[in-house]
Image (spheres, grey):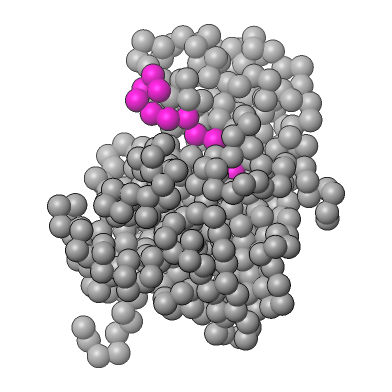
Amino acid sequence: MTKGACQCCCRSVAVSSDNVSKIFQDAMEAGKGILRLTPTWVPRVFMQPGRRIKLAPTDWYALGVDRGGINERWFSSTTEAGNPGRQPDEGLSYVKFNGQKFLLRDAVAEGKGTVVGDKIWDKFKRWPVYSKFFDNLGPIFHHLHQREEHAKLVGQEGKPEAYYFPPQLNAAENHFDYTFMGFEPGTTKDDVKKCLENWNKGDNGILDISKAYRLKRGTGWVVPAGVLHAPGSLCTYEPQWGSDVFGSFQSLIEGRQVEWSWLVKDVPKEKHNDFDYIISMLDWEKNVDPNFKSSNYVEPIVDEKQSGKGYTDKWITYGKIDGKQLFSAKELTVYPNSKCTLNDNGASGWILVQGHGKVGELTVDTPVMINYGAEPNDEIFVTATAAKNGVTVENTGSEPLVVLRYFGPDTHPSTPNIGDHRKVN
C-alpha cells in the first residue's frame, strides 16, 4: 500500500465459503462478537440515483448503464437481490477482517445461534431480514411486495417492509417528496382491473384511485405485504423481510414506460395475463383502509430504559404486522464526550449516519464520500453473543454520533404499537 493511502479504500480479498471457519472465529474473537461489514451496493434498471447515500458521482453507474443506477445500499444482508443479469453476490453483505472478507451469510451458517440467536437460527436457519437505504431522484411506480401465499408459488417469500427518513440524509427532498399508498376508500376491484386493461394505452390511471402522503423527515411508515405504494423521493432507511419480490401496477412513471414484465416478475407464468389472480395479490382491506395513515404511520418514541445522560435511544420501526413482530429498528444518539452500554435482546445490523467513535473494540466513523469497492468503517453487525454481553458505544468526536440499527423477528419482549407516538409526543 502506498504510504499515506486511505486504508478504507483498500479492497479486501474474498475468502471462499469452504475456508471461512478460521477467519470467522478470529474475527469474532477480535471484535468480541462485533463484525465489521463492507458496503453492499445494488443497482436498479428502472431507477435514477438520488445522490444522497454518499456513493461517489463517478460510480453511480459502476456496474454499467445497462444494469441501471445504484440507488440502494443494503445492510447486514444475507438476501440476494432479485435483479436481471445480477452478479452472483449481488445484495449480499461481506464481513471484513485483516485484509480479507467473507460473506455474512457464510458467517451465519458457521456460527448459527451465536451469530443470529438460537431462536432465529432454529426457526429460519438464516438471518431472515435486512435493511437498506433507498435513494431515488424522483418517485417510483405504484407497486406491491407479494404476500407469503403468492410469493411461495415462485419459490420466494413475502415481503413486508418499513420506512424511516433520516434527517442526516435528507437535506434535499429531490423531485417528489410524496408517496402514494393504497387506494382511496370506495375503490373497487373493477377499477383496478380497468387500469390493468389500459396498460398499453399510456398512463393506466392507477394513481387516480390512490392517495399521496407528504413525507416528513424523522418519521416513518410500516407497509405490509400486498399493499400498493409508490415511494417518493426522500432518502429512506428500510427494515424489511429478507425477500426481493415485487410487482408494478403502474404503466408510466414520469413519462417513462414500465413494461408489463415488471408487474409479473414474481407471478407464475400461467398467471401472467390473469387479471383476477394479479388483483388477488393485493391485500384488499389494507389497501382501502379508510384509516390508512393511523394504521401505518409512525414517529420516533424514546426508549426510556435505554436512554440516559448523554445518550438517547429511540424506536423508529415498531409494532406488529398481521399480529407478528417481524422486524424493528432504533436510532441511537450519543452526544460528544459521552458513552453508553446497550443491552439489546438479540443480534442487529448497524449503520452510522453521523459522527465517529467506538463500538466495543471497533473504531467507527461516518464517511463523506465512498467510491464503489471502498471499505469505510461505518457498518457493523452485532451478533447475538455480543448483544448478550452488552455493547459499549462511545462518542470521541465533536458532533453527535448517530446510529441506525435493526433487529430480527421477535427480538424484543414488546415494542410500542403503531399509533403510540400520539400518546407520548
Residue drawn at 19 percent across, 52 percent down: 17
Residue drawn at 62 percent across, 29 percent down: 322
Expressed as whole percent of the image width and height from the top left, the position of residue 362 reads 42, 76
Say whether residue 221 is left or right of residue 248.
right
- In magenta stretch: residue 354: no
Say whether residue 161 is left or right of residue 85.
right
Placement of 393 over or under 127, stated as above or below: below
Which portion, as a residue range, is magenta?
A: 152-162
**Front residue of this view, candidates 217 and 197:** 217
**Front residue of this view, candidates 48 and 274:** 274
**Front residue of this view, candidates 250 and 333:** 333
- In magenta stretch: residue 158: yes
Say whether residue 160 is left or right of residue 102.
right
Expressed as whole percent of the image width and height from the top left, the position of residue 77 reads 39, 50
Q: Is residue 206 visible?
A: yes
Say whether residue 155 is left or right of residue 305.
left
Residue drawn at 22 percent across, 65 percent down: 23
Placement of 38 over or under 297, stated as above or below: below
Classify the position of the N terminus by image quarter: bottom left
